[in-house]
Image (cartoon, rainbow, N blue to C red):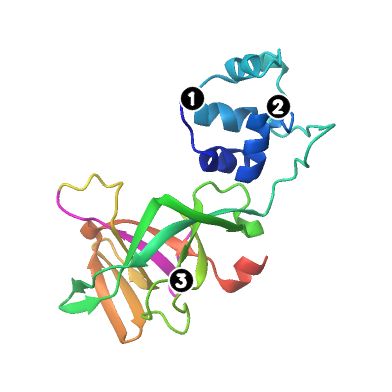
């Protein structure tokens, strides 16, 4: 089975260089990596341990909150630079209430790089980053700025958000070619109202066209 080093690196909270060294035997395989490797390779922890020559049963594995001591190789401290930056580009304008609104094409399957993970997102696998595309949110979110985003965070009026849009009537609710990076004005059961700055425009998107809404971290949260 061919598995992307990027997926393995993200699963164990390390970079691709470390994964390559583990695979090549430069770094000893540590039991702290078992769960991450096993989940990506789709094997049980016992199977994985037997393949790398470590004879331990699941009962012998340390608890998830245990401190594992490593006697050789690199530090087990989770690196900061493990937040994936998803590929994005300026998409075609989309009409809402008769107005052409700038949108972003976001590809969650394409990881451009990894950047520093803010402390507030520690352990949050649903977090990611993206490059702001276009000038519609200037000066709050300038073109090209990297922002950190997290799914399932509480939303409030005034938050900057990433709104995932449905593509068509047969959309499965999981894929999305286009997203809106805007400010949240208000939400109701039937619509979400958004704001952009350049040009200044408030507009409503029917909730039937929305898959989900993720919150963009504030600069203060990014610095923590």
Residue 53: % across, % down: 69, 15
Residue 80: % across, % down: 67, 54
188 relative position to 150: left or right? left
Kindly tell me whether residue 94 is visible in this rendering. Answer: yes
Q: Earlier in the sequence, mark 3 or mark 2?
A: 2
Residue under pointer 2: 31
Residue situated in front as seen by the camera: 33 or 206 = 33
The answer to whether residue 16 is above or below residue 99 is above
Residue under pointer 1: 42
Q: Quadrant of the C terminus?
A: bottom right
The reply to whether discs 1 and 2 touch (Cβ–Cβ < 8 Å) is: no
Are there few (<14), some (14-19), or many (20+) residues within 10 Å of tag 3? some
Alpha-carbon span between mark 3 and mark 1: 38 Å
Residue 206 within the magenta-colored segment of the rendering: no
Number of numbered discs visible in the structure rendering: 3
The answer to whether residue 95 is above or below residue 130 is below
Residue 164 within the magenta-colored segment of the rendering: yes
Residue 159 is marked as: 3
Alpha-carbon span between mark 1 and mark 2: 16 Å
Kindly state the secondary structure of the residue where label 1 is placed.
loop
The magenta region covers 153-169
Residue beneath the point at 71% across and 12% down: 55
Residue 215: % across, % down: 46, 63
């Amino acid at each position: 089975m061919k598995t992307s080093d990027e997926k393995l690196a993200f699963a164990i909270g390390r970079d691709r260089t470390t994964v390559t060294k583990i695979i090549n035997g430069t770094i000893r395989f540590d039991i702290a990596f078992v769960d991450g490797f096993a989940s990506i390779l789709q094997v049980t922890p016992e199977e994985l341990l037997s393949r790398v020559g470590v004879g331990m049963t699941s009962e012998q594995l340390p608890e998830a909150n245990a401190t594992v001591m490593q006697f050789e190789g690199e530090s087990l401290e989770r690196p900061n630079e493990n937040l994936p930056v998803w590929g994005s580009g300026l998409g075609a304008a989309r009409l809402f209430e008769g107005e052409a609104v700038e949108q972003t094409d976001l590809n969650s399957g394409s990881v451009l790089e990894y950047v520093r993970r803010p402390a507030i997102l520690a352990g949050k696998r649903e977090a990611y980053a993206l490059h702001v595309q276009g000038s519609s949110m200037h000066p709050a979110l300038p073109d090209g700025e990297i922002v950190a985003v997290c799914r399932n965070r509480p939303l409030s009026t005034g938050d900057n958000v990433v709104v995932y849009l449905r593509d068509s009537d047969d959309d499965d609710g999981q894929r999305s070619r286009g997203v809106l990076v805007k400010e949240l004005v208000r939400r109701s059961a039937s619509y979400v109202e958004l704001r952009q700055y350049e040009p200044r425009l408030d507009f409503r998107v029917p909730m039937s066209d929305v898959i989900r809404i993720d919150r963009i971290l504030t600069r203060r949260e990014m610095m923590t």
